[in-house]
Image (cartoon, rainbow, N blue to C red):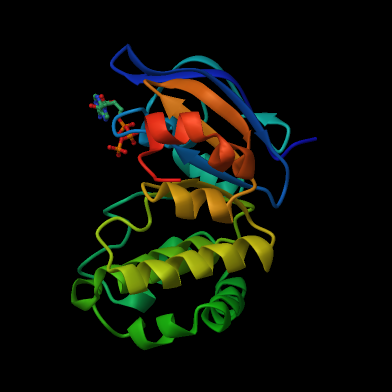
């Protein structure tokens, strides 16, 4: 049984359809990149999968359970994580306070144990524990936001353009961490990313969305090799 099965999903806002009829499945530990031109509905698809946009048709099964209409916090309790582009940390709180909030529903001892595991995995976050999130750089905030996800031990994390507005060197680091949490911790990943080449190199599977519809779904390497699609929709050379 796949961890996530998306069947003919249509998503939109106020009854207006933005994403139409998208289907894919993800097994545990797989890595899917969602790519496509600006405005093609990539973020909307993630929001639909997390219960933050209107599902206008189709079905989403997670761990075998129909979650199509489930509230976002219940999805989170089931092991789904979602990292939006912005607004992913509480700015006025310290790193530790952010992490405590992320684990609000975990028993105290579990939380402390998990926090230690997360800090071993993301050692740089130790340095942010007593700093207010407002004082952190964009890349540091991403790391804190990632730690907030990991403390919940998700089986799936969905990232919405984690590299947006970050310096190239920092992007490298963020991607390395995403790769490690997939390969090392076995967490299933859906990545929406502007840097298509990078996304397709790190992922196994790819979904190319054009005007809200699936233009390609399959092996990420195969999409990279499809010069026609790459030239038309992805703006990367060769
Ligand atoms: N909250 C909203 N209400 C109404 N329409 C929206 C909302 N959010 C996005 N849209 C519209 O949905 C369409 C798809 O937007 P979306 O952000 O999902 O695309 P995207 O592929 O993620 O784009 P980008 O790569 O530029 O981030 C756009 O036409 C956008 O204007």
Residue 67 appears in the figure: no
Q: Position of residue 194 (x, y in %)?
A: 36, 47
Q: Would you say 34 lies left or right of 86 here? A: right
Q: How many marks?
A: 0
- Which residue is most to the right? 1
Which residue shows up at 54% across the image and 42% down it?
224
131 above or below 35?
below
User: Which percent across, then down, holds residue 159?
Assistant: 45, 50
In which quadrant of the rendered view does residue 235 lie? Answer: top left
**Residue 22: x, y in percent?**
53, 21
Residue farthest along the front direction in this orientation: 238
Where 34 sits versus 61, above or below?
below
Which of the 4 quarters of the picture holds residue 181?
bottom right
Ligand 1 quadrant in view = top left
Of residues 208 and 102, the one nearer the viewer is 208
In the image shown, does 95 or 18 lie closer to the viewer?
Answer: 18
Residue at 65% x, 47% y is 204
Residue found 35% across the figure and 58% down from its top? 163
- Quarter of the image with the N terminus is top right
Residue 164 drawn above or below residue 25 = below
Q: Nearer the viewer, residue 53 or 226?
A: 226
- Can you tell which quarter of the image residue 91 is in? bottom left
The answer to whether residue 180 is left or right of residue 212 is right
The residue positioned 32% from the left and 68% from the top of the image is 168
């Amino acid at each position: 049984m796949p961890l996530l099965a998306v069947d003919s999903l249509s998503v939109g806002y106020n009854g207006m359809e933005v994403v139409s009829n998208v289907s894919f499945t993800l097994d545990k530990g797989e890595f899917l990149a969602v790519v496509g031109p600006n405005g093609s509905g990539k973020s909307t698809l993630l929001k639909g999968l997390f219960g933050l946009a209107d599902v206008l048709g189709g079905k989403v099964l997670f761990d075998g359970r129909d979650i199509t209409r489930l509230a976002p916090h219940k999805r989170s309790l089931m092991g789904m994580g979602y990292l939006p582009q912005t607004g992913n940390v509480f700015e006025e709180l310290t790193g530790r306070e952010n992490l405590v909030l992320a684990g609000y529903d975990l028993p105290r001892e579990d939380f402390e144990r998990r926090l230690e595991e997360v800090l071993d995995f993301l050692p740089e976050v130790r340095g942010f524990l007593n700093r207010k999130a407002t004082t952190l750089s964009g890349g540091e905030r991403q790391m804190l936001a990632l730690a907030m996800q990991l403390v919940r031990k998700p089986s799936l994390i969905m990232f919405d353009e984690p590299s947006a507005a970050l310096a190239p060197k920092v992007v490298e680091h963020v991607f390395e961490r995403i790769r490690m949490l997939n390969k090392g911790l076995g967490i299933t990943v859906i990545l929406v990313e502007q840097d298509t080449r990078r996304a397709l190199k790190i992922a196994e599977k790819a979904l190319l969305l054009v005007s809200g519809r699936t233009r390609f779904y399959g092996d990420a390497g195969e999409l990279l090799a499809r010069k026609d699609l790459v030239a038309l929709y992805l703006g990367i050379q060769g």
